[in-house]
Image (tube, grey):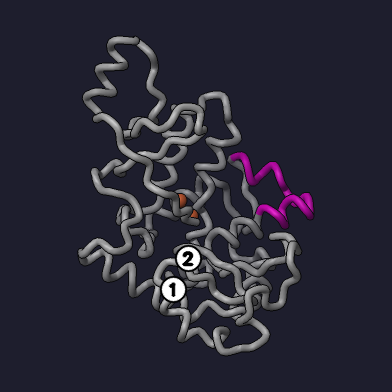
Amino acid sequence: MTILIDQPELIGSRAEDQNLQEQTNELVLDGGFVVPKTMPNDGFVAPEINSFGKTFRDYNAECERQKSVEEFYRLQHINQTYDFVKKMREEYAKLDKAEMSIWECCELLNEVVDESDPDLDEPQIQHLLQSAEAIRKDYPDEDWLHLTALIHDLGKVLTLPKFGGLPQWAVVGDTFPLGCAFDESNVHHKYFKENPDSNNPAYNTKNGIYTEGCGLDNVMISWGHDDYMYLVCLLCFESNHNCAGAYSSRSTKI
Ligand SMILES: [Fe+2]
Ligand SMILES: [Fe+2]
């Protein structure tokens, strides 16, 4: 899942940060990344560039990667329909694709590159490890958060033949609700025009099939790695099926 945020104003530089750190001898909790200063007490800081020195989530930058990212979103917006998601949820709720440990699943991501990500074209196992290690450095006592970072994108195994070999548009990219009108804040919104649901009067009004305030549990979200991981965790907890296995070296069904 991608969360779009406003870019914070970058004040100062890495060198200034280091100077400050040397002068005050205070630990800078930046997970090894360049982190801009933000207003105090706002609770959240975001780096302006990634570890490869590029800016984040610039969907309009003119480069080859940007063109393939836009083509990815064209296919995703045309093909993710309410009926498609319903079918996928039924299929993957069977948890009959594999049985493995978390680490075995992490290693499978050595084969997966996320085509929707304008920032990163490295295998996804690097993303998992970087996320987990950066969070461990910044929040050493929050072990649940280290684990969350490590497993958050495991659902991308959906692209592998053993897990159905789904196309990238059915696995990665931003997610959005189905069964109601597509909001204009979605990146590359124009391609939703070709989605059959855009012409379905049951789905193309503001609230569509939902009632105001019905709660996210009742909303059908586009199918992909996030929804798959959510489904695996949910079914695991609900059935109490080898739940400990999901968080240890023991294996669990996915
Ligand atoms: Fe993700
Ligand atoms: Fe991620």
Q: Nearer the viewer, residue 254 or 167?
A: 167
The answer to whether marks 2 and 1 mark residues whose Cβ atoms lie closer than 8 Å is yes
Is residue 21 within the magenta segment? no
User: Few, some or many C-alpha atoms within 10 Å of disc 1 (few <14, some 14-19, many ≥20)?
Assistant: some
- In screen coordinates, is 114 left or right of 54? right
Q: Where residue 83 sits in the image (x, y, percent)?
A: 63, 81
Q: Where residue 93 sits in the image (x, y, percent)?
A: 68, 66
Residues rendered magenta in the picture: 233-248
Work out how far the residue at label 2 is from the one at label 1, CA to CA, in angstroms. Answer: 7 Å
* Three-letter code for the amino acid on which mark 1 is drawn: His
* Three-letter code for the amino acid on which mark 2 is drawn: Ser
Is residue 245 within the magenta segment? yes
Point out which mark residue 189 bears: 1
Residue at horizontal 52 percent and vertical 72 percent from the top: 164
Point out which mark residue 10 bears: none
Residue at horizontal 68 percent and vertical 67 percent from the top: 219
Residue at horizontal 36 percent and vertical 59 percent from the top: 117
